[in-house]
Image (cartoon, grey):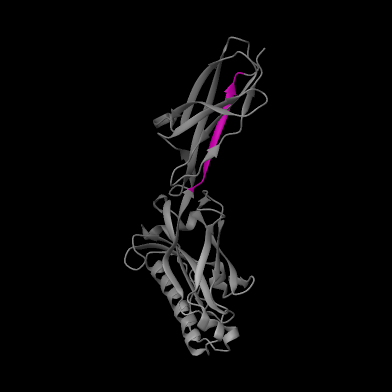
């Protein structure tokens, strides 16, 4: 990825990692790092090393602490319920900074020494890394996890992404979650891929049925334009050669798909037009099902008064 598209993400502020997470152990933490919120290229490797160092720090605290009976009984730390923005994807537009929320649950150990989730893209976390994001909680040295019941912790981490500073179109598509969790159970979690998720270019779909009102027997033209965020130009552009479905209904009732069409190219990029003969009052709207790089979107319906 071209490095000129990235801002330098080093803040120059040093923080001590893991102090609050390790307070229960009574151990001091001496690791000093400079946090990176999001980074590509060299910065991505730096952010990755910071996450690894924090995990090692938590493991060292665990090794130095006396083992409890509960810890001896627990076989392993378990991570479950990993979600990104409540599901498996997040979307970012052209100008506004978006907050992406990752949640997960930890169980299996009575004491938590630390946990962190990071977002990354590339073929391999160590040798093929393209992007690596540490969370806002990681940067601020605050705990992302809170106790929830017996030997269970609910965790939430947020990530802020400014598309004008950090993203190019190459970044759309599959990403992974790197996640570690250290408890007093016998084994811990340290995985490069706790979940595969998709970062998508925000989409929008216009819709217009005209003329309105229209005389019975005349032609109605329903026009749509499918666009998505372009992270290279920071504008919206027509999304070409994509399937959109025309859906119709009476003035009351539910929409149903009546036909499927492919959006245009060139000067008609993202545009789709269909005609209908005016018979009775009717509502029309287009729907796009989405792709791995672009979220689904449904246009606002437009109802035509037939006279």
| Residue 72 on image: x %, y % | 51, 83
Is residue 32 visible in this depiction of the protein? no
Residue 300, image quadrant? top right
> Toward the viewer: 182 or 95?
182
> Toward the viewer: 195 or 159?
195
Residue 213, image quadrant? top right
Taking the view exactly as shown, the residue that stands out farthest to the top is 217
Q: Main secondary structure of the magenta part?
A: strand
**Region of the chain picked out in magenta, as a range:** 201-211
Residue 208 on the magenta segment = yes
Give the left or right position of residue 272, taking residue 96 as reference: left
Q: Residue at x 39, y 59 (%)?
A: 4
Give the quarter of the figure containing the C terminus: top right
Against 301, residue 7 (above or below) is below
Taking the view exactly as shown, the residue that stands out farthest to the left is 127
| Residue 106 on image: x %, y % | 54, 70
Taking the view exactly as shown, the residue that stands out farthest to the front is 73
> Toward the viewer: 295 or 255?
255
Against 270, residue 228 (above or below) is below
| Residue 287 on image: x %, y % | 53, 34
Residue 67 on the magenta segment = no
Q: Residue at x 49, y 54 (%)?
A: 164
Q: Residue at x 55, y 33 (%)?
A: 206
């Amino acid at each position: 990825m071209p490095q000129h598209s990235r801002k330098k993400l080093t803040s120059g502020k040093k923080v001590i990692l893991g102090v609050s997470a390790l307070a229960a152990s009574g151990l001091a933490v001496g690791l000093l790092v400079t946090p990176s919120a999001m980074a590509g290229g060299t910065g991505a490797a730096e952010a990755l090393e910071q996450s690894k160092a924090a995990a090692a720090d938590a493991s060292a605290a665990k090794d130095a602490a006396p083992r409890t009976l509960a810890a001896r009984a627990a076989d392993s730390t378990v991570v479950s319920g990993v979600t990104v923005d409540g599901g498996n994807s997040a979307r970012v537009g052209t100008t506004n900074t978006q907050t992406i929320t990752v949640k997960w649950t930890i169980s299996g150990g009575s004491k938590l020494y630390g946990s962190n989730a990071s977002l990354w893209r590339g073929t391999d976390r160590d040798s093929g890394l393209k992007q690596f994001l540490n969370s806002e909680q990681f940067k601020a040295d605050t705990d992302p996890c809170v106790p929830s019941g017996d030997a269970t912790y609910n965790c939430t981490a947020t990530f802020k992404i400014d598309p004008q500073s950090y993203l190019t179109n190459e970044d759309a598509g599959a990403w992974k979650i790197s996640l570690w969790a250290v408890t007093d159970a016998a084994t811990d979690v340290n995985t490069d891929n706790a979940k595969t998720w998709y970062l998508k270019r925000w989409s929008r779909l216009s819709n217009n049925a005209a003329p309105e009102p229209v005389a019975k027997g005349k032609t109605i033209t329903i026009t749509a334009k499918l666009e998505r965020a372009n992270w290279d130009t920071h504008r919206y552009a027509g999304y070409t050669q994509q399937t959109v479905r025309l859906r119709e209904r009476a003035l009351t009732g539910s929409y149903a798909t009546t036909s499927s069409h492919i959006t245009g190219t060139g000067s008609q990029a993202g545009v789709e037009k269909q005609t209908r003969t005016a018979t009775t009052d009717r509502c029309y709207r287009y729907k796009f099902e989405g792709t791995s790089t672009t979220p689904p979107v449904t246009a606002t319906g437009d109802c035509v008064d037939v006279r």
